[in-house]
Amino acid sequence: MLPILPKTDMKAIVAYHGNRPITQSEFLGDIEALATNLPVHTRHVINLCKDRYWFSATLFACISRGILTLLPNSIAPEIVAELVSEFPDLLCLGDQNSSVHPLPYLQVSIAHTLPSLEVPKVPSVPFDLPILRVYTSGSTGKPQGHIKTFGRLCQCATAEAERLWTIAGGPCAVVGTVPFQHMYGLESTIFLPLLGNGQLTARLPFFPADVLAALLELPAPRILVTTPFHLRKLVESNQAFPSIAAIISATAPLSLELAESIENRLGAPVVEIYGSTETGQIATRLPTHNPRWLAYDGIVLKQEHGLTTAMRGHLEGPQVLNDMLELHSSSQFQLLGRNSDMVNIVGKRSSLAYLNQIIIQLPGVTDGVFFSPKTESEHEVSRLAAFVVAPKLQLQDIQSSLLQKLDPVFLPRPIIFLDALPRDGNGKIPASVMTELITRHLS
C-alpha cells in the first residue's frame, strides 16, 4: 500500500490556483469531498476538467476510490463513442456547467472546501492499482491505450524529481504549456509536483504573454514545462521573463540552435526529456552540454537485432522502443530517429524529424513539416513533399535555402503553402489529420 501523496507537513503548499496557495490539507479535503460525491458503483470515468487543479483533485479522488480514469487523445464524438462501446458504464467528469457529450455527467466542485478542524487522512492505495488508461497521440497511427499503475507512476515521478530538482537546485513550482491529459503533461505538470514535493499550478498558458503572467504569479524557484513549438514563440517574443530555474522540453526533437537561443534568452538551463506513452519518461539530456541521453536511475537499455529494449526501473516489463538509438552504455545513448520516421531516397537516408528541424529554422518560415506521399507503384522513386507556413516567402526562396542545407534528393516536391498547421497542444500533428491534409492538397 502507498499513500496517494507524500507524507509532508499538512500546512505545506502543494499547489497554486492562480496566485492562491493551496496547502496539502486543503488539497486532501478537496479530494475527499470529490470522492464522496462520485456515484457508488462508478468504475470508469473520463476526466474533462479544463483547470489543472480540478483535474488533479478529481484524478486523485478517483485514485482513492480505485476508479480507472480514461484519457483519450481526443474527445471527438467518434472517439468517445468507441470508448462507450468498450466501457458502457463510463461517467464523464468536468468543471464546466455541462458536457457536450451524451454521457452521464458530473460537475466537480468549483469552490474549495472549508478548512476542517480535523487533520485530513492521507488515503492509501495498492502499488499495482490501475489508475489510468492513457492513449497515444495518434501522430504515427491509430491511438493505442496503455494501462498505468499508481506505484509505477510514483516511481517515475520520483526519478524525474531527483533528476530535475538537482538541475534546478531544489523543488519548484511547475508551470506547463502542455496538455495534462497526455503522458508528458501528466508526468511533468501533475505527478512531478504532487509526488515529487514541488508545487502544481493550475494555469495552462499558451502565448508568451500568458506564460509571463503565469510565471509572475508564483514565487521562485519555478520551472517551465513546454515544447519546441512554444519555445520558438518565446524566443521570438519581446517579453522580459522572471527568473526560471530550468526549462523542460519534450514531444519533438529540440535543435541545438533553439536550445542555445532559449538559454541565452531566458538564462535557464534547458533539459530535454525522452520517453513515450508506452514507457513514460526514461531519460534526459542537457542538449547544450552533451548530445547523449542519460537514463533515469534503474532503467537499463540493451540492443538485439537492431532493436532497443528498455527494462527495469519504473517499467512494468521490458519495452521495445520505437526509436533508433546508438547505445554508449546500458544507460547512455544518442537518439538517431524514430524507426517509422526514417526515409530512404535513392539509397540516401535521413529522418523526417531532422528535415523538419531544418525547414522550420529557415528565415521567414514560421512552421513547416515534411512528409512522404505514397507512390503509384513500388517501382516509382519516392519523393518528399512539405507543408510550410511562410507568409512573406515564395517557392524559390524556400527551395534555395533548403539546397544550402540538404542533399538535393531530399528537396521537397511539391512545397505547399498553408496559413497554419493543425497542431495539437503538444505541437504534434495527428496521423489522421496529416492524412486528411495530404488527401486534400495532393489528390
Image (cartoon, helix red, strand yellow):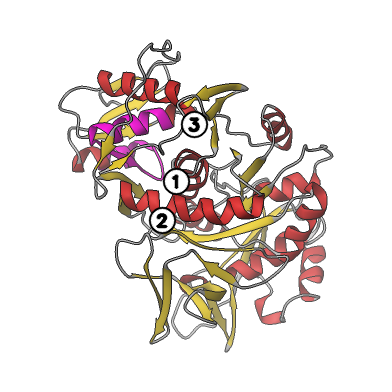
Label 3, on which residue?
A: 52
Q: Which mark is residue 277?
A: 2
Q: In the shown orientation, is residue 413 left or right of residue 342?
A: right
Give the SS element for disc 3.
helix
Q: Is residue 388 in view?
A: no
Residue situated in front as seen by the camera: 418 or 235:
235
Q: Are marks 2 and 1 in contact (CB under 8 Å)?
A: yes
Single out the mark in the foreground, 3 or 1.
Answer: 3
Callout 3 amino acid = Arg
Near mark 3 (Cα within 10 A), the count class, few <14, some 14-19 or many ≥20, is many
Residue situated in front as seen by the camera: 436 or 131:
131
Give the SS element for disc 1.
loop
Please state the horizontal and vertical placement of residue 242, each as a whole percent of the image. 77, 37
* First to last magenta residue range: 56-82
Q: Residue 48: within the magenta?
A: no
Q: Is residue 127 in view?
A: yes
Callout 1 amino acid = His
Q: In the shown orientation, is residue 133 left or right of residue 410?
A: left
Residue at horizontal 18 percent and vertical 32 percent from the top: 89
Q: Which mark is residue 422?
A: none
- Of the numbered discs 3 and 2, the one sitting upstream in the chain is 3
The correct choice, above or below, for 49 with respect to 192 in the image is above
Please state the horizontal and vertical placement of residue 437, each as a whole percent of the image. 53, 53
User: Disc 2 and disc 1: Cα gap in Å?
Assistant: 8 Å
Residue that lies at the very extreme toward the bottom in this rendered image: 347
Q: Which mark is residue 182?
A: 1
The correct choice, above or below, for 134 with respect to 328 in the image is above
Residue situated in front as seen by the camera: 58 or 324:
58
- Of the numbered discs 2 and 1, the one sitting upstream in the chain is 1
Residue at horizontal 63 percent and vertical 22 percent from the top: 19
